[in-house]
Image (cartoon, helix red, strand yellow):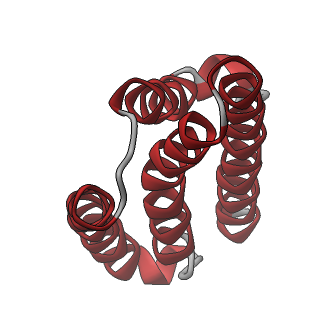
Amino acid sequence: MVKKLASKGRSTAYKLIGLQTVAVLLASLIFFLTNGKMAAVSALCGGLISIFPNFVFATLAFRNAGASASREILSDFFKGEALKLVLVIVLFWVVFKTLDVIYLPLFVTYALAIVLHWLSPLIFKSKKVG
């Protein structure tokens, strides 16, 4: 039962990352059509700064399953969240240092991906367990 729940959690996390990716691609397309190539690239960067750390977190956090691995699971969640924060900071730094981005599209798609993450319990309602 616990392995099934862990698998469901991993599956839901990857579905959320897929939804975030689609939303960021659509937003980038809108920015491309309305403001040009640099706005689209900026939008993609903002979305990736949010999505990539989420993917790393989901992969790390759900790698252990089972009640006997509860201590490892908790440790992985903390490590994953810390790594996610560091990745966001590093990715923003890399983008600001290496690319001449337009800030509005970058922050709009970054915020869009985060809002989708916050809304995920409403988006992916599941049956009660137990």
126 over 8 or under it: above or below: above
> Residue 22, how many percent across, how many down?
78, 39
Q: Quadrant of residue 2?
A: bottom right
* Closer to the camera in the image, 13 or 4: 13
Number of marks in picture: 0
Q: Could you tell me which residue is drawn at 49 percent across and 51 percent down?
A: 45
* Closer to the camera in the image, 63 or 59: 59
Is any part of residue 38 visible from this angle?
Answer: yes
* Closer to the camera in the image, 77 or 21: 21
> Residue 106, how many percent across, how many down?
43, 36
Q: Could you tell me which residue is drawn at 55 percent across and 42 percent down?
A: 38
68 over 62 or under it: above or below: below
- Report the side of 113 relative to 82 (left or right): right
> Residue 72, how many percent across, how many down?
36, 82
Q: Could you tell me which residue is drawn at 45 percent across and 82 percent down?
A: 69
> Residue 92, how many percent across, how many down?
27, 55
- Report the side of 88 relative to 24 (left or right): left
Quarter of the image that includes the C terminus: top right
Is any part of residue 125 visible from this angle?
Answer: no
Q: Quadrant of residue 29?
A: top right
Quarter of the image that includes the N terminus: bottom right
Q: Could you tell me which residue is drawn at 76 percent across and 63 percent down?
A: 4
